[in-house]
Each structure stands twice: as structure tokens, then as C-alpha cells.
Amino acid sequence: MKEYRLSQQTAIVGFDTLESNHLTQAKSAVIRGIAAATALEPLIPVIEKGESAVFKDHLAKLIQNVKGLGKKEAKAIEKETAASLKGDGVLEEVPALIACDMNYETAGVKIMEYRSDETEYRRVVESIRAEILEDGKPSAESLCLLWLFRETFLISELFSSTEQVAVKQRIGEASTENECYRMLFEAEFHSVFNSFSSSFLKTKKNLFQNPYLEGVNLLFPFLERRSAIFIDLVVLGSTVKSRREAVLCYLAERGHYAQEVKNGPETLLLIDNSYYRIFPMTKAYYKIPVQGVNLVPAYV
């Protein structure tokens, strides 16, 4: 099995579910993460040796370059990275899940998104989860990847709210033991997004009002990478189980991998590589009530 570089691992997890034909804030963050990973990887031996004076200079230049990344450069990085991963068969473009939403489907809007190979996606995710959450000293590569995932708004996709407390503690431990890690985790580039501060405050308020954001922990930067989706499914008198089955068939017909997954007392839908909760819902469409279901991103 091929071992992927830091930048490629960032892309495999980061590009997944993002629109491939539009430069969104979320994708811009991931592209910056790929650029940062490319510059950070050669510095791993410096970090391991604890050469903080050398690392400090390189890190400052890295952050400056990543924050100043232009659209033309970002597009070139995306094109090159995506082409490489597509060539390996671990990334593909498929009709976007959001295109299943009634508003998009009735309008005939075509939206494409990236989908990472499930096996490779899980390999990257489970590897860093094991390194960070289990006993033992995490590798320098895993701590660097953790920082990259933080800066690309991916922590809530990979760790539960409870686990994020442990992640924060692990960062503190590493920073105490090695000055290079302290400098790394104090450095950031996610603030280049102008609306981040207002979005962060809005999210903080929504946490106390919106049960759909359950599982989000504001210990780390958060940006909604996925949207709720309303699917028009008239299943009168159906049970919860039959409603889920109807949704699974609907999604499969549109090229998505979907299955039911138990999460404690509740049942979630795993769609491609992401989890969703399903709720019955009636939505007005041109003042006409339409019965269906709402798929809401789940952070577990």
C-alpha cells in the first residue's frame, strides 16, 4: 500500500465532500493546508531534533507564504494535487450530495464534488486518531498533520467533542516537551478568512440554539464544510426504518455510497465518508407543503 506524503494526506481528508468546480472558503483552507504541508514536511527532522532556532525561521516564512497565497497559485496547487491523487485512484469527482437537495434538483443545477477512496480516507483518519488518542508518544508526522487538520477546519470531522478535550491535552503535552511543537501550535493561517471571526461567534451562539450542531466543540476552529439537504420523498404512513431505506435507495441511484451506522442509541447514515442524521420534515415549495426528509451533518 502506497505511503502518502503529508500534503497528500491533507488533501485526501480535506478535499473529500468539497465542490470540485468552485473555490469555496473550505477548499481554500485545504489548499493552504496542502501548501503548508509541502513546506513543513522537510522540517520534520528539525522538529524531531528540537532545533527550535532553525525551525522558528522556517515556520515564520511558511506562515507568511501560506497566508499570501493567491488564487492563481491556489488553483495550480489544487489541479496538481487532485490530478496526482486521481491518478492513484484515491480521489474522484462525483455528483455533489447537495445536488440531491430539492431546490437544486428541481432547478437542474449540476454540481460536482471530490470523493476520496473510503479505504485510504479511513486509513489516514484512523492512523492519526490512534496516534493522538492512544497511549504512547505521537510521531512528529502525526502532530504536524494534527496541526494541518486544525488549520483546515477538520478537527470536528475527525474527533468527537469529548475526544477534542483529549486532543487539546495532547497538544499541551507535546508543546511542553518540545519547543518546536509549541511554536507550531501557536502559529496559524486560518485567520486569513475574513468572515471567520463573525462565523465563529455565530457558530458559538448557534451551539446553544441549534441541536444539529451537537458534537461541535469550540476548542478548535470550526467552519461548516457540509450543508443540510432536504430530499423530497413522499412516503405516507412510513416508519422511520422504511424512510431511511427509501433515502438509501435514492442516494445509491445518484452514485453515493450510503449505509446505516449505529452510534450508541441512535442510527446515523454514513454517506460516502461523512455522517448525517435524518429527520422527517415538511417544506414549503412555492407555498405548497412538500413532505420529505432532512439530512443534517453529524459530528460524532
Image (cartoon, rainbow, N blue to C red):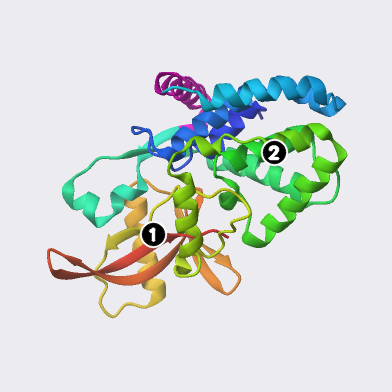
Magenta stretch mostly in which secondary structure?
Answer: helix
- Which mark sits nearer the N-terminus, 1 or 2? 2
In depth, the one of 192 and 112 nearer the eye is: 192
Residue at x 58%, y 41% (from the top left corner):
121
Task: Provide residue 250's location: percent of width, then percent of height.
Answer: 32, 57
Q: x, y (%) of residue 132? A: 75, 47
User: Dividing the image into 4 quarters, which one contains the C terminus?
Assistant: bottom right
Tag 2: amino acid: Glu
Residue 94 in which image quadrant: top left
Q: Which residue is drawn at 13% across and 68% down?
A: 287
Indicate whether 239 appears above or below 101: below
For image coordinates 46% across by 64% down, the residue present is 206
Residue 20, picture quadrant:
top left
- Secondary structure of the residue carrying numbered label 2: helix
Separation (CA) of disc 1 from disc 2? 43 Å
Residue 273's tag is none
User: Would you name the residue on which mark 1 appears?
Assistant: 248
Residue type, label 1: Leu
* Residue farthest bottom in this picture: 237
Contact between labelled residues 2 and 1, with CB atoms less than 8 Å apart: no
- Report whether residue 254 is seen: yes
Q: Residue at x 83, y 28 (%)?
A: 48
* Front position in the image: 290 or 154: 154
Residue on which the image places disc 2: 186
Density class for disc 2 (Cα within 10 Å; few <14, some 14-19, many ≥20) is few
Q: Few, some or many C-alpha atoms within 10 Å of disc 1 (few <14, some 14-19, many ≥20)? A: some
SS type, badge 1:
helix
Magenta-highlighted residues? 71-91
Residue 58 placement (x, y as % from top left): 70, 20
Q: Is residue 61 magenta?
A: no
